[in-house]
């Protein structure tokens, strides 16, 4: 099972740091956003397993973002917990009626927050992440930690495995080097961006040596990062 990824949406840096500390101690992965636009971009780039969403944000409200996400097919079932200082019953009812998965008022205990997150993930099924991925004759299994292409097992290192897993789970999105660094090594790791390029080249070579057509799945997007594009394989 993959580690659940939580997106923290709050304009107060201190609150995000406190939440990140508590969640990472409980073995969650965390991403952050301080505005509605940052949050929407983050969700579009790499969809999280769950969102912790403040009500008051620069440029709008968390309720506006909640409404937008519930109206879009890709995010209509995304678990979203409102995490706010608003305690009025009308606010709670409004958020839940609009599709919030849960509503937690500040202040709160870390133990309660983590318990509510786990309960929400269980209800949504988001904690039972997909374990098998396939693109054409390329298959990846996170349980057996095995990658095959045209029925043959590939000799693939742990970092290349994680990179391919991330790409196959998040296809047709452009992922920046910074995003890939955070996904593979965590935001605190002292790893340079060019390290991503090294592992991309290794992964491409592994695919190239087995079936040249599949090395083209990983595309360089100039000035932006990398994209894994299964649709191009199907079109070829």
Image (tube, rainbow, N blue to C red):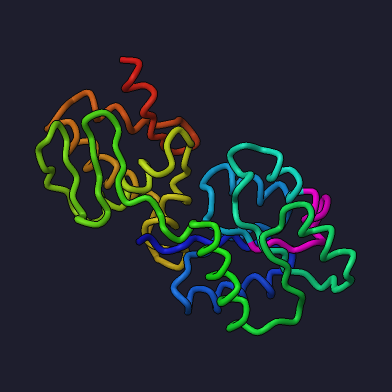
Instruction: Give the residue displayed 53% in from the left and 48% down from the top.
Output: 47
Instruction: Give the residue displayed 48% in from the left and 36% down from the top.
Output: 173
Residue 143 placement: quadrant: bottom left
Number of numbered callouts drawn: 0
Rendered position, 56 above or below 233: below
Judge left or right: residue 44 versus residue 219: right
Magenta stretch in the rendered image: 52-64
Which image quadrant: the C terminus? top left
Residue 215: x and y in percent read 24, 30
Residue 178: x and y in percent read 47, 51
Evaluate whether residue 138 shows in this view: yes
Rendered position, 116 above or below 232: below
Judge left or right: residue 65 versus residue 182: right
Residue 28: x and y in percent read 47, 69
Judge left or right: residue 171 versus residue 97: left
Nearer to me, 70 or 173:
70
Residue 195: x and y in percent read 32, 51
In magenta segment, residue 59:
yes
Nearer to me, 135 or 162:
135
Judge left or right: residue 189 versus residue 46: left
Instruction: Give the residue displayed 49% in from the left and 74% down from the top.
Output: 24
Evaluate whether residue 195 shows in this view: no
In magenta segment, residue 38:
no
């Amino acid at each position: 099972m993959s580690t659940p990824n939580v997106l923290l949406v709050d304009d107060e840096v201190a609150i995000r740091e406190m939440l990140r500390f508590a969640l990472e101690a409980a073995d969650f992965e965390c991403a952050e956003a301080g505005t509605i636009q940052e949050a929407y971009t983050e969700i579009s780039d790499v969809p999280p397993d769950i969102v912790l969403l403040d009500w008051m944000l620069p440029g709008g409200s968390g309720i506006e973002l909640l409404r937008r996400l519930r109206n879009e097919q890709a995010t209509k079932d995304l678990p979203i917990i409102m995490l706010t200082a608003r305690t009025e019953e009308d606010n709670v009812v409004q958020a839940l009626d609009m599709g919030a998965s849960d509503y937690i008022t500040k202040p709160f205990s870390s133990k309660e927050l983590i318990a509510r997150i786990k309960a929400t993930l269980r209800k949504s099924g988001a904690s039972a992440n997909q374990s098998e991925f396939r693109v054409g004759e390329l298959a990846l299994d996170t349980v057996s930690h095995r990658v095959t292409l045209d029925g043959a097992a590939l000799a693939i290192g742990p970092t290349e495995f994680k990179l391919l897993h991330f790409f196959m789970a998040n296809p047709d999105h452009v992922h920046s080097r910074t995003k890939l660094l955070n996904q593979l090594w965590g935001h605190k790791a002292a790893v340079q961006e060019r390290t991503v390029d090294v592992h991309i080249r290794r992964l491409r070579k592994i695919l190239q040596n087995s079936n040249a057509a599949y090395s083209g799945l990983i595309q360089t997007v100039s000035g932006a990062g990398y994209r894994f594009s299964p649709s191009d394989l199907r079109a070829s």
